[in-house]
Amino acid sequence: MNTKPTLSVALAGATLVSLTTFSSAQAAQVTLSNYEIPENLILYDTSGTFDSPNIFFNEPTDTIQISGQTVLGEESTYEARIYFPTNGGAGGPVFNEWKGSLEDKFLYAGPGGLAGFNWPLYPGVALGSGTPLAPNTWHHIAFVQGGGTQRLYLDGQIVGSRPATGDIGDSDGGGFVGAIFRDGGIAPSFIGHLDTLRVSDVARYSGDSFEAPTGDLFSDSNTQILYNFNLDDYYQQDGSTWVSDLSGNGRNGRFSTGFNGASSPSIVIPKTEEPKSVPEPTSALGLLAFGGACASSRLLRKGQQKSQDNTHS
């Protein structure tokens, strides 16, 4: 496999980790209920690992393409609540809006640390932290620019900073959650779970610490994009599954599109959401897949899920 280094991520102020890409050759609106989500997107959490719906990026090509374009000025906050399983978790872009040498708004996370970047400040080198993210637990992560610095936060504690003042580059590149095609190849997605993602045009957090949010994030006048990944946030349009942008700006996210080989993340339905009955299918959406026992500490990959479904059907 050919890899191509692109953005250098400085972890713990010393180690440089390169974001790699791989070739693409290698790799009417109706609100959905948990009955109606296409079965190939469902992972049903029979283990009780999760108590609320979330979304699972479990393949390097899993992606959601964001409609429209953010405009940020000199301040920004990219934040999410993220969960990495003990086995199989991996680092990659959580949010990236990119176009050549014109725009690069970037939040990276993995079990080994965090990184953030705003073009054109510090060209080619992201602010990074090598502070590990403990597995099997939800973490709040944030990359903030404002007040003369860029800052990284993990669970409300500052883990990296550097001086930074200036306008954040805007273009028409459009954004992605997960995998993105950039620099001539696919930058692989992180492997893990999200339950909320917010992009803002203001520096929401400052200082050395703050009380980290523990639930769904909210929208206000500074919110550019907000996805909470609840079951009533999804809909079908133009033959695709979409997630609604709760900011009111119309930057809805479309599953499995934007580059050749793009795949869909999975919608996790917790045990508490178990349907009481199954209606007859009335469209191409088909029946909800019920199978798929999960390991106690993580959910299985899509291929393993389908295998178990077939075994128990």
Image (cartoon, rainbow, N blue to C red):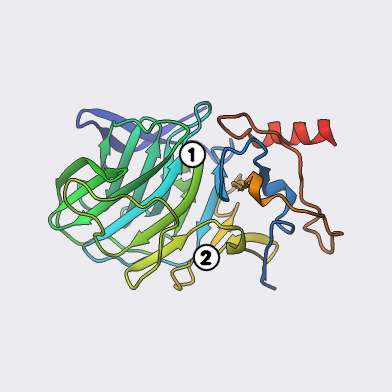
Residue 87 position within the rendered picture, expressed as x and y whole percent measured from the top left = 53, 26
Residue 225 position within the rendered picture, expressed as x and y whole percent measured from the top left = 42, 63
Q: In the rendered image, which quarter contains the C terminus?
A: top right
The residue nearer to you, when weighing 181 against 138, is: 138
Q: How many marks?
A: 2
**Side (left or right) of 120 relative to 38:** left
The residue nearer to you, when weighing 293 against 235, is: 293
Checking the image for residue 188, the label placed there is 1
Pointer 2 local density, CA inside 10 Å: few below 14, some 14–19, many at least 20: many
**Side (left or right) of 45 relative to 212:** right
Residue 80 position within the rendered picture, expressed as x and y whole percent measured from the top left = 40, 50
Residue ID at (56%, 50%): 52
**Side (left or right) of 205 relative to 78:** left
Residue ID at (69%, 31%): 304
Residue ID at (84%, 59%): 279
The residue nearer to you, when weighing 80 against 265, is: 80
- Residue 85 seen in this snapshot: yes
Q: Nearer the viewer, mark 1 or mark 2?
A: 2
Determine whether the residue tagged by mark 1 lies in a helix, strand or loop: loop
Q: Is residue 144 above or below residue 172?
A: above
Checking the image for residue 252, the label placed there is 2
